[in-house]
Amino acid sequence: MPRRAGRRLALAAALTIIGSGLAPVGASAAAPAPSEPRITTAAAFDVSPPLRELATATVPGTAGVTGAERAERGAVPSDKGFQGDGAVRGAATDRRAQDPLEQISPPRINFEGVANSANPTLISPPDPDGDVGPNHYVQVVNVQYSVYTKTGLRLVGPAQIGTLFAGFPIEDCTGFNGDPIVLHDQAADRWLITQFTVDGPEFWNCVAISTTPDPTGTYFRYAFSTGPNFPDYPKYGVYPDSYFISTREFAPDDSFFGIGAYALEKQRMLAGDPNARALSFVLPPGDAPYLTGDGLLPTDWDGPRPPRRGTPNWFVGTMDDGGPYGAPFDALNVFEFNVDWRPTPRATFGLAAQIPVASFDSIFPCNPPPDTRDCIPQPGTANKLDILSYRQRPTWRLAYRNFGTYESLVTNQSVEARPGEAGVRWYELRRPRGAAAPSLFQQGTFAPGDGVHRWMGSIAQDKNGNLALGYSVSNGTDVFPGIRYTGRLAGDPAGTMARGEQTLINGSGVQLVSSRWGDYTALHVDPVDDCTFWYTNEYFATSSNNGWQTRIGSFKFPSCRF
C-alpha cells in the first residue's frame, strides 16, 4: 500500500469577522492552528481521442459487474422528534405572486435523460448532474454520460464514464466508479467531466477537460491522487484561476479521516500542461466535528462578471444543533480558500465565519434501524425513499454571482419542515463591497403544507437576481416520485418562493426495493441569455426495483430577457 500522502492538516486561521449576522469563530470552538497546504502535480496526463469515438470503447470496468447500491458511508442518527423550523412559510405566503402575470414559466424544453437501463447492471442512486453551454447540454449519472443539443437531440451516449478515460495511464479511472460531476466553464468555454475511483489502495480524482468548446471532441485527461484516502462525495467549483474540489475522505479502515479541500491549477490544465499542480488540505473532525460536518460545497461561479481580484473561494457547510455532532446552534459555516499560483504556490484554508440561521431540523423521522434511510413515502408501497437530510451538509450547488455592488451565494438543504413533512431550506448569502465575509441576506423553507414532500433540491439565480429551485416530490397517496420547481423574483418579500410551482414531469411509478435517492441534482443557468434555468433530476415512470429515469428541462422568468 502506498505511503500515506501528506499528514493530517488542521484548519488555517482566517478569522477576521466583519458585518452583521456573523458569529465569531470563538463563539463555538477554539480556532485551530494554521497549516501549510500539500503541493502535488498531476499523477498522470494525456490527450484523449474524440469523445464521440470513445463512447463506443470497451473498458475493464464493465467486466463481471453485478448489481450495485453505491455505498453511502456514515451512521444515520435517530430522530428525536420535530425540532421546529423558523423559516417555513404558509401555503398562501409561498404561492401568492405579487404580480399574477409574472409566474415562473412551464418547461420550455423538456426531454428524457439517461436511464438506469443504460447501465450494464442496475445502480442506485443515480447522482444525476448536468450543465448547459452555448450549444450543448451534457448530463452525467452513475455511471453514464450523454451529450445533447439544446433541443434534446442526443449526439453522444449514453456511454459509461470510464470510456472517457479509455487508454489513460491510470486504469482505475476507466472503472465502474461514480459520483460524477460535469461543469461548463463559461469563461473558458470548456467542459469538465469527472469521477472518483473506488478500488484502491490508492485513490484518484479523475478530471477530463475538453480541449475546445465542443464536448464531443478531445479532452485533456488528468488524475490527482488522494493517497490511501477514499475521496467520497467530490463536488467541484469553477473559479477564475482554479478548479476547486471538496471531498469527504475515508481511511483504509473505512474510518472517517476528514474533509478534503483541493485547488487545481486551472490555466495549466486548460493549456494541456502535464505538470498542472494541486494544493490540498484535509480537515480532521477534531474536537468540533460540527464545523465541517459531512462535507462542504465549494463556490461555483455563474455569470459573465468574475469575482473581484483576491476574492477567496468560499466553502460552505451547515450544522444543526439537533444533529449528530454536538453543534451549539443552527448555522452555516463559511471557510475561505485563498490560492496564489506562482513558482512556489501559496494557499490558506480556514474558517472565516459562522452564520446563525433560523432553526431547522435535519433529522427526519425515517424508519427505525435497520431501515433508517427509509424516509419519504410513495403511493401503493411500503418502500420509502432516502431524504439524506441527516447528512450535515448543503446540497449541490453553492452558486456564486458577482452583481458589482455585492456578491451573492445561494445553496439549499433538505429538512423536516413540519412534523413528518419534508421541505427545502434555501439560503442567500451576500458580501457587500468592502465586507470581509458573506453574511445572511435571506432564507426560507419551501413546504407549502399540501401533504407533498419536497426534497433533494438545487438552486441558482439568473442575471437579475431571480431565484429558481428544483427538487423531488412524492407522498404516500397520489404523488408518485417526480420533479417540480419554483422560484422568486429579486424584489419579492424576503424568504418567499412566490412565483408559482411548475412540474417538469410527474412520476407514474414507484421504487420498490432500494431506498436510495439522489444523492444530488443540478440546476444551472444558460450562459447565452443568463436567464434560462436548466434542471436535471430523477423520477419513476414505471414501478420497478430501481429502474429510475432522469429528465432534463429548461424554464425562465418572462421578465428576464436576453
Image (cartoon, rainbow, N blue to C red):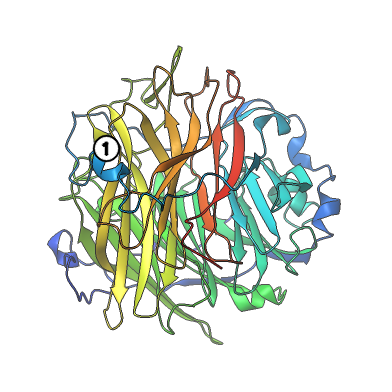
Q: Residue at 71% across / 61% down in the picture?
A: 135
Q: Nearer the viewer, residue 178 or 497?
A: 497
Is residue 541 shown to the viewer in this render? Answer: yes
Q: Residue furthest front?
A: 101
* Residue 19, quarter of picture: bottom left
Nearer to me, 138 or 341 = 138
x, y percentage for residue 296?
Answer: 39, 56
Q: Is residue 348 above or below residue 392?
A: below
Q: Is residue 148 left or right of residue 236?
A: right
In the displayed orientation, state which residue is furthest to the bottom: 343
Badge count: 1
Placement of 19 over or under 200, stated as above or below: below
Relative placement, left or right, of 371 versus 321 is: right
Check the picture and name the quadrant holding the C terminus: bottom right
Q: Residue 449 in the image: x percent, y percent?
A: 27, 32
- 267 sits to left or right of 485: right
Measuring 59% from the left and 29% from the top, which residue is drawn there? 548
Q: Secondary structure at mark 1?
A: helix
Closest to the observer, 393 or 412:
412
Q: Position of residue 286 (x, y in %)?
A: 28, 54
Circle 1: residue type: Ala
Q: Residue at x 25, y 40 (%)?
A: 92
Label 1 crowding class (10 Å Cα cut-off): few <14, some 14-19, many 20+?
Answer: some
* Residue where numbered disc 1 is placed: 91
Rendered residue at 36%/68% (across/down): 408
